[in-house]
Amino acid sequence: MTRASKYDAKAQRWTEREYADARGYLAHRARLVVELGPRLEPGDRVLDLACGDGGLGEHLRARGLVYVGADSSLPMVEAARRRLGDGTEILHGDLNELAPANPVAATTCFRAIYYARDRAAFFRHVAAFTEKKLVFDLNPRQYPLDAVRADLGRAGFDRVELRPFFAPQRVSPPAALGAVLRVAEAVGPVARLALRFRFSYLVAAARTRS
């Protein structure tokens, strides 16, 4: 079974099944895609690698961004096209090799960075067509931050910003708890302690020089 094929049967309503509060979770992620690192502006094009059924695309488009999705599972590509409509470009291809026809302002890669066959090579590949920033999630208990920073630097991404991301995926917390978690994301000591046990970072990698 290939990596793509194991997701084929899950394409139908992937977003709704994967996230307990899909709207809240993905809206929070979309806000950070815009705000973390160099700010994205309405009209900027965003390439979402490993886009699944395009759930994030709805929220990025709501912020005025031009969304381009890409996934290696053809049923996921078809599901994204159904979700987002004919006016949205959804590409079929592997994140290690796919490149858009034209440069994009930002590239995102969520829940999929571990599919990079060679992380440093993947970062170099993305840098070739990304003008403002690469945004991805990272489990610091799985990948040492210093090693990831080094790989980003070798790809030319010399500006790296981290933001803890405490939105639960599998449970929908009460509104009050959700608000507390989002405040805690910005509290350094609390966030660093929590990340020793669970949750992830959002990473925005950019270049300070051309």
Image (cartoon, rainbow, N blue to C red):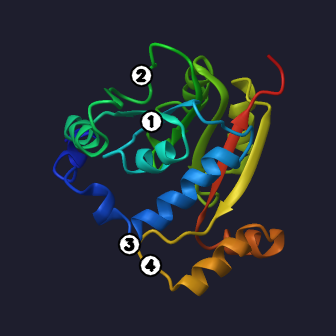
At horizontal 50% and vertical 14% (from top left) the residue drawn is 102
Q: Residues within 10 Å of mark 1 (few under 14, many from 20)?
A: many
At horizontal 70% and vertical 48% (from top left) the residue drawn is 35
Residue at mark 2 to residue at mark 4: CA–CA distance = 34 Å
Q: Residues within 10 Å of mark 3 (few under 14, many from 20)?
A: some
Q: Upstream in the sequence, badge 1 or badge 4?
A: 1
Which image quarter: residue 136?
top right
**Amino acid type for the residue under numbered disc 4:** Ser
Read off the residue under disc 1.
49
Residue at mark 2 to residue at mark 3: CA–CA distance = 30 Å
In this rendering, is residue 185 above or below 124?
A: below
Left or right position of 114 against 183: left
Query: In the rendering, at what x and y percent does residue 169 appear?
Result: 45, 68
Q: Upstream in the sequence, badge 1 or badge 3?
A: 3
Secondary element at tag 2: loop
Residue at mark 1 to residue at mark 3: CA–CA distance = 22 Å
Read off the residue under disc 4.
172
Read off the residue under disc 2.
98
Q: Which residue is the extreme one toward the top?
A: 101
Read off the residue under disc 3.
20
Q: Upstream in the sequence, badge 2 or badge 1?
A: 1
Q: Upstream in the sequence, badge 2 or badge 3?
A: 3
Image quadrant where one finds the C terminus = top right
